[in-house]
Amino acid sequence: MEKATPILVITCAAVAREVNDIKKLSQWSQMDLQAISADLHATPEKIPQAVADEIDKARDQYEHIFVAYGDCGTSGELDRVLEERGVSRIPGAHCYDFLAGMETFEKFQDDEPGTFYLTDFLARHFDRLVYEMLGLDRHPELLSMYFGNYTRLIYLAQTDSDEITGMAKAAADRLGLRFERVFTGTGEMVPALDAAMQEALWHS
């Protein structure tokens, strides 16, 4: 099969909107996207195989494949399957790293380890991906078990949206955490994707 498109970016659905926005703004018509359900964060041990399956399916169609995923709780297993396939990914343990920037995120953690984080995606889907997935809608008594050691919630904002900020603030209130908002935009995603795009074009 002819390889007509230089690059495929395989991304978690939690940051797919940001990847797509960067693609549009950069006018990268040579880039295709494939998103994998963010629900897999509930079972991170399944993420490496899901990413590997997408790589294997796409191998004959693309000159270059890049993965926009953090380690996301796979304990290095994602990097192992990527190394086997000669595929690289955006640096970071999770999306908070590359959205906030690694140095900034480390400072947040050092200043206050008991910090829970939301992104635009998580703020919009807080009920399903956090509250319901942890069973707090059915067993509210579990709140102290899950969040008893947390003191604040930082909303890492990709957009200037009063609506999403309100969602994030409501989530902090429900969890009983102090609320802070930090605007990150797309953080370190642009340089990482740009580097992948340039490499793909160079080798195409």
Image (cartoon, rainbow, N blue to C red):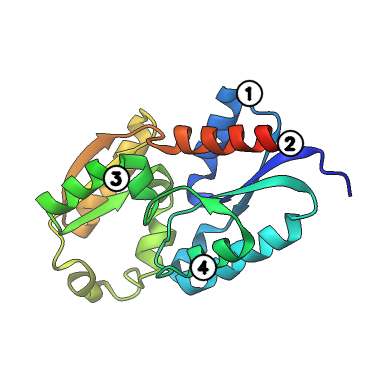
Kindly identify which residue carries mark 2: 204
In terms of secondary structure, where does tag 4 sit? helix
Q: Is residue 12 visible?
A: no
Image x and y of residue 138, in percent: 35, 74
Which quadrant holds residue 73? bottom left
Q: Which one is closest to the eye, mark 3 or mark 2?
A: 2
Q: Is residue 159 visible?
A: yes
What type is the residue that disc 3 sits on?
Met
Q: Residue beneath label 1, please?
A: 27
Judging depth in this view, the residue of 166 and 204 nearest the camera is: 204
Residue 34 point in image, percent of width and height: 65, 49
Label drawn at residue 102: 3
Q: Earlier in the sequence, mark 4 or mark 2?
A: 4
Q: CA distance from mark 4 to mark 2?
A: 26 Å
- What is the x, y in percent for residue 170? 27, 47
Asked whether 97 or 87 is in front, the reply is 87
